[in-house]
Image (cartoon, rainbow, N blue to C red):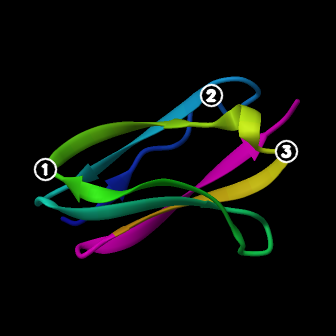
């Protein structure tokens, strides 16, 4: 299997939120948050990760209330998970 991602918790987020992704092989992984019109609003990671699961903290305080998509991509695939921020 390829790259996988777990849902954001809690959902909707108001203060702190996180999610986990797993990469089957060591690779460069990019983690981005895009808004509802497809613009990147945050780059959370763009670096080499060993194989295995990794937890990512989401900077909720720097984002406005709304609907976002977290995009996780590497050589093994591209996956997304929704993020809802509600104040």
Q: Name the residue rendered at 63%, 53% in the picture.
A: 82
Q: Name the residue rendered at 77%, 44% in the picture.
A: 63
Q: Can residue 12 be seen in this view?
A: no
User: Local crowd at mark 2 within 10 Å, few (<14), some, or many (≥20)?
Assistant: some
Judge from the rendering whether residue 24 lies leftward or rightward of residue 53; answer left or right: left
Q: Marks 3 and 2: which is nearer the front?
A: 3
Q: Marks 1 and 2: which is nearer the front?
A: 1
Q: Name the residue under label 2.
A: 10
Q: Can residue 43 be seen in this view?
A: yes
Question: Secondary structure beneath disc 1?
Answer: loop
Tell me which secondary structure the magenta stretch mostly adopts: strand
Judge from the rendering whether residue 6 lies leftward or rightward of residue 9; answer left or right: left
Identify the residue at the far top of this view.
15
Percent across and percent down for residue 17 are 59, 30
Q: Answer with mark 1 or mark 2, whichever residue precedes in sequence.
A: 2
Percent across and percent down for residue 41 are 69, 60
Magenta-drawn segment: 74-87
Percent across and percent down for residue 15 are 72, 23
How many numbered tags mark residues here? 3
Q: Name the residue under label 1.
A: 50
Look at the picture and state if 39 lies above or below 41. Answer: below
User: Local crowd at mark 3 within 10 Å, few (<14), some, or many (≥20)?
Assistant: some
């Amino acid at each position: 299997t390829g790259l996988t991602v777990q849902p954001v918790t809690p959902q909707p987020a108001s203060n702190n939120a996180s999610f986990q992704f797993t990469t089957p092989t060591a690779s460069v992984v990019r983690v981005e948050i895009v808004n509802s019109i497809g613009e990147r609003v945050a780059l959370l990671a763009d670096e080499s990760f060993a194989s295995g699961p990794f937890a990512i903290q989401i900077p909720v305080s720097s984002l406005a209330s709304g609907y976002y998509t977290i995009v996780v991509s590497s050589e093994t695939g591209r996956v997304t998970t929704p993020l809802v921020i509600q104040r």
